[in-house]
Image (cartoon, rainbow, N blue to C red):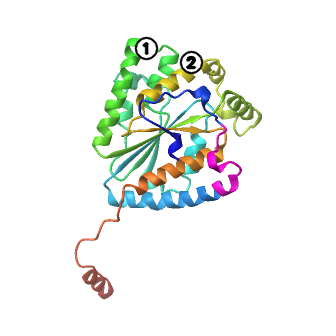
Amino acid sequence: MNHHLVKPDSKVKLGEINANDCGKWEGKKEEAKLRLSELTVKLDQLQEILYAEHKHKVLILVQGLDGGGKDGTIRAVFEGVNPQGVRVANFKAPTSTELDHDYLWRVHTEVPAKGEIVVFNRSHYEDVLIVRVHDLVSQSVWEKRYQHILEFERMLTDEGTLILKFCLYIDQEEQKKRLLERLADPTKQWKFNPNDLQERKLWNQYMLAYEIMLNKTSTEFAPWYLIPANHNWYRNFVIASVIVDKLESLNMQYPAISGDIEAYKKEIQAS
């Protein structure tokens, strides 16, 4: 799945990305869905070892426009994982208390501890996306944040955190389709926000903000994966594949028990 990796200092142009791209899995939807089921089982096993070993920390960011499928991605990929070791942090509009602190304060309080996977639904990148598009702070302020974020993520990785960042890309036509589907389905209408209509009018501004974010903040230590997300099955399969591959690369092991196992057995049998 490395062809979705945004290489450091690359020049991503979202207008050149095919949001319908399924790579070599074109026409293999059922096979990919079956593989996803296998990956979620493997992810559950890896998460258990991660939790038991209590050594590594894993931070997964899911970022994307309205209708991009952030909630669906998290639900599909982590469906079978033990909730004891996985936590989802949602970043919506900051509260008054959060605004009284620096913009990374609320983020730092949510980063994973040893043995934990934390999934960010949206993230600190909102502070160079919506903040930039809506001029919530001056350019002189948000321009500095790219470097702040790089330094923040560098610190986390230096302290033993594996960071994986996924940007879900749908095209404008697919977003329209999904917004209309929300309005047509009573079980999904609660997800619709009239503000989405105003945000949609700012599509080009968001595309520019996302391009700059991807180009400035994809690094060797905290890379972005730009995921074509018009097809939910492919989006979920790719993200699960990357996560499993990266967790396997940690070479995690169950910790060995201390003491004499045979003596413990004898004591239990005699009790």
Q: Secondary structure at mark 2?
A: helix
> What is the x, y in percent for residue 117?
42, 49
Three-letter amino acid code at the position of disc 1: Val
Q: Residue at x 44, y 24 (%)?
A: 127
Q: Residue at x 58, y 30 (%)?
A: 65
* For discs 2 and 1, the disc positioned in front in the rendered view: 2
Magenta span contains residue 170: no
Which quadrant of the structure image shows residue 125?
top left
Where, quadrant-wise, is the C terminus in this rendering? Answer: bottom left
Q: Residue at x 45, y 36 (%)?
A: 7
The residue labelled by disc 2 is 205
Residue at the farthest left position: 259
Instruction: Give above or below for 73 relative to 135.
Output: below
Three-letter amino acid code at the position of disc 2: Gln
Q: Is residue 48 left or right of residue 168?
A: left
Q: Nearer the viewer, residue 14 or 131?
A: 14
Please give the label number shown on residue 137: 1
The boundaries of the magenta stretch are 20-32
